[in-house]
Amino acid sequence: MRIDKYLWCTRYYKTRSIATEACKKGHVRVDNKPVKPSKDVFSGEKIMVRKNQINYEFLILDLPLNRVGAKLVDLYRKDITNKEQFEKLELLKYSKDYYRKKGTGRPTKKDRRELEDYQDED
């Protein structure tokens, strides 16, 4: 089975074209080597997928015939991702909360006055 089809079947990517683009950009590695979307994969190979700034690693247990349901994904792969990757994601979430939300634009006069009042209290 092709790597892009496998990633789509096991629900790592929503569409097969997104999986193909990820392979072309080098976000997918098989046995620690970047691969083309047409690379055939077999059971027992180790795959690393970089998605949302996390390196997901998993071992192929079996190849599905079609796209599988979310509850059945674990029959076809074994997740061996390090816990450190998920801790890094938590730190990224906390750092993003510090900044203003995207699309809120420049601070308003009310925001500026609140900042000045806060600084004057010190």
Image (cartoon, helix red, strand yellow):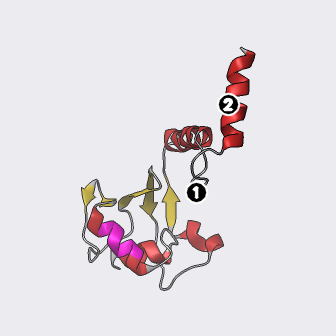
SS of the residue under disc 2: helix
Left or right: residue 106 versus residue 39 is: right
Instruction: Answer above or below: position of 26 versus 83.
Output: below
Q: Quadrant of residue 113?
A: top right
Please tell me whether residue 19 belongs to the stretch shown in magenta: yes
Q: Residue furthest front?
A: 109
Q: Residue at x 31, y 59 (%)?
A: 29
Viewer-nearest residue: 104 or 51: 104
Q: Where's the N terminus, which quadrant?
A: bottom left
Residue 46, image x and y in percent?
A: 37, 58
Picture mark count? 2
Q: In terms of sequence position, does the residue under pointer 2 or pointer 1 come before the other?
A: 1
* Residue at image mark 2: 115
Crowding at label 2, few (<14), some or many (≥20) Cα neighbours within 10 Å?
few
Q: Main secondary structure of the magenta part?
A: helix
Q: CA distance from mark 2 to mark 1?
A: 20 Å
Left or right: residue 77 versus residue 47 is: right
Amino acid type indicated by mark 1 = Gly
Q: Which residues are magenta?
A: 18-23
Amino acid type indicated by mark 2 = Leu
Instruction: Answer above or below: position of 116 versus 62.
Output: above
Q: Quadrant of residue 108?
A: top right
Q: Residue at x 28, y 64 (%)?
A: 25
* Residue at image mark 1: 103
Q: Residue at x 28, y 61 (%)?
A: 26
Crowding at label 1, few (<14), some or many (≥20) Cα neighbours within 10 Å?
few
